Amino acid sequence: MTTPTITLNSGTTIPQLGLGVWQASNDETENAVRYALDDAGYRHIDTAAAYGNEEGVGRGIRASSVPREDIFLTTKLWNSDQGYERALAAFDASLQRLGTDYVDLYLIHWPLQDSERLLRTWDALEEIAASGRAKAIGVCNFEPHHLRLLLEAGKTVPAVDQVELHPHLPQPAIRSYADDHGIHVESWSPLGGTSNSGWGKDSKPNTLLDDPIIARIADRHSKTPAQVLVRWHLQNGLIVIPKSVHTERIAQNIDVFDFELDELDLSEIATLDDGTRVGAHPDDMNLGAPE
Ligand code: A2P
């Protein structure tokens, strides 16, 4: 069964489910990407300069039998490269590492507390989009006040905002603002993240994959907890990028189109909303800001 697509405000279509590769080495990434494309049926890969595995993504794509134009490829600009000139140079370096001449989506990885520099970064992304080398541009970890800044000062509305989002942190304020402005929300750490990702003062280890409520729902559908979580994102209209480097899990996470969560399932999952994060709050961290 093929993954549904969503049309972004740029006119580009994005498969609603993709493969995430944070914390995977280049070799792990190459194998995961090739398997995901050739064997599991993924057509959307999400990486970032800061993950250090763009080369692995490029190698995995080239090792697969899927043509580049059939793949939706996202990468992200790290904070030390914010600013107009630096962003343009960082984008070229990403393309070089990926071994491609365009990406489907280029994202600012993290907001800066320096609004002026952030806006100059967005100027660079708008220029990159105008050149056709990024089919769409967007942001990550933007709170509504960051989005408002871009909407007021920029010419382009971001196509997506990729934020930490899962049943413990369903992000209603960001989703509502995004909906009102034609921005699609992508969920990172959709399965609750890695147990050792504890960065940021509010972060907690992943408990979702072992949660008894999720396990009970999974049993009712003869599915796994990860599949229940992926379905929850899809049914909420979110773009979802579960990460795994294990072939059986990569296959499992896309095998979610033969069941549906019902009202009871969704109401039980809604009780898990307790605001816990596995990552940092965007307003608490000026991550990697240039000197
Ligand atoms: P691994 O790569 O070792 O499979 P998220 O996407 O929320 O960041 O979470 C991904 C975490 O969950 C990773 O640690 C990943 O580890 C693990 N994971 C991914 N898919 C599954 C699955 N189907 N079942 C159990 N764990 C999974």
Image (spheres, grey):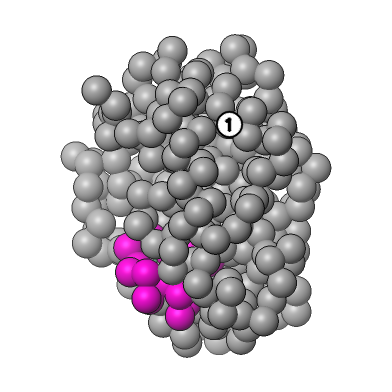
Q: Is residue 46 visible?
A: yes
The x, y position of residue 3, in whole percent, is: 71, 69
Q: Residue at x 59, y 12 (%)?
A: 153
Residue 30 magenta-highlighted: yes
Q: Residue at x 41, y 56 (%)?
A: 189
Q: Residue at x 47, y 36 (%)?
A: 89
- Going by the numbered disc 1, the residue's amino acid type is Leu
The x, y position of residue 38, in whole percent, is: 63, 83
Q: Quadrant of the C terminus?
A: top left
> Dot 1 surroundings within 10 Å: few (below 14), some, or many (20 or more)?
many
The x, y position of residue 273, in whole percent, is: 42, 48
Q: In the rendered image of this protein, does residue 166 appear above or below residue 255?
A: above
Q: Residue at x 58, y 74 (%)?
A: 62
Label 1 sits on residue: 125
Side of 71 where 60 appears, left or right: left
SS label for mark 1: helix
Which residues, given as a range, are shown in magenta? 19-32
Q: How many marks?
A: 1
Residue 146 magenta-highlighted: no
Q: In the rendered image of this protein, does residue 27 appear above or below residue 198?
A: below
Q: Is residue 191 visible?
A: no
